[in-house]
Image (spheres, rainbow, N blue to C red):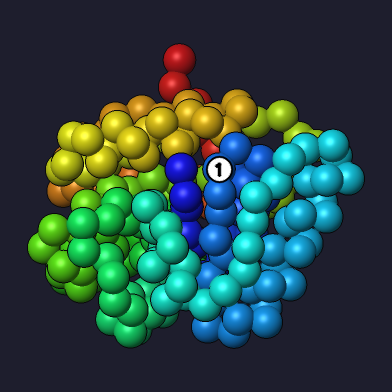
Amino acid sequence: MRVGIVGGTGDIGEGLAMRLSSRHDVVIGSRDEARAVTSSQCCLTTLRQRGLPCSCEGTTNQQAVDRSDIVILAVPFSHVAGTVSGLRGFSGKIVVSPVNPIEKRDYFMYVPPPEGSAALMIRKLLPPDARLCTAFNTVAANKWRALDQELHLAVPVCGDDREAKATVMELVNSIEGIRAYDAGPLAASCMVESLTPLLLNIARFNRMRDVGIEFR
């Protein structure tokens, strides 16, 4: 698969690129093309030092959309509307949202937009034929980047397009130690997104790091 990561120079974007680029062609996008090139070179160096193959290039966010079959929106919730609205070329493509609308107060809170979830808000910003799914919402950025650490994590996937959801689950399952689970339609994304502040609170109040989920 050819996977574009919009916002690919952030912690989650870079981590996903490192996990995916040994098995797929990854295009890291950024508003700053030079930063994307630097991130792609870091990814190449990191994987090759471990004796792993790597297919990764850095470019603009727009080119990441244009050159990819699957587009991951690795963008903070506060920036996602402005970022998506400034891009074109999503028509007919699979788009993945790992976006979680949360705020840090005395504890982490789920603060969805009026649409009910980040995913449902994003759907309104995309062309009608874009094939939107949620995935990767519950995995901490540090988990993606810790390549020497064995993963044992579940990733719930929501979506209304059966074929698109199956493709996204295949992408998730291509990462060693990660297992995708069908979590229902896009309308159920609010339940997945709200798991992230729960995990952050558990980590904070129990002095744990990078808490994730598994289903057994």
Q: Amino acid at mark 1?
A: His
**Image x and y of residue 161, in percent:** 17, 41
Relative to 198, is 57 on the left or the right? right
Quarter-of-image position of residue 129:
bottom left
Q: Is residue 9 visible?
A: no
Q: Residue furthest front?
A: 67
Which residue, given by chain and number where applicable, does mark 1 sit on?
24
Q: Residue furthest top?
A: 216
**Image x and y of residue 110, in percent:** 35, 60
Task: Name the residue: 61% across, 53% down.
Answer: 17
201 and 177: which is toward the camera: 177
Point out the image quarter for the C terminus.
top left
Task: Name the residue: 65% across, 50% down.
Answer: 55
Q: Residues within 10 Å of mark 1 (few under 14, many from 20)?
A: some
Q: Is residue 173 above or below residue 190?
A: above
Task: Name the residue: 55% across, 38% down.
Answer: 212
Quarter-of-image position of residue 112:
bottom left
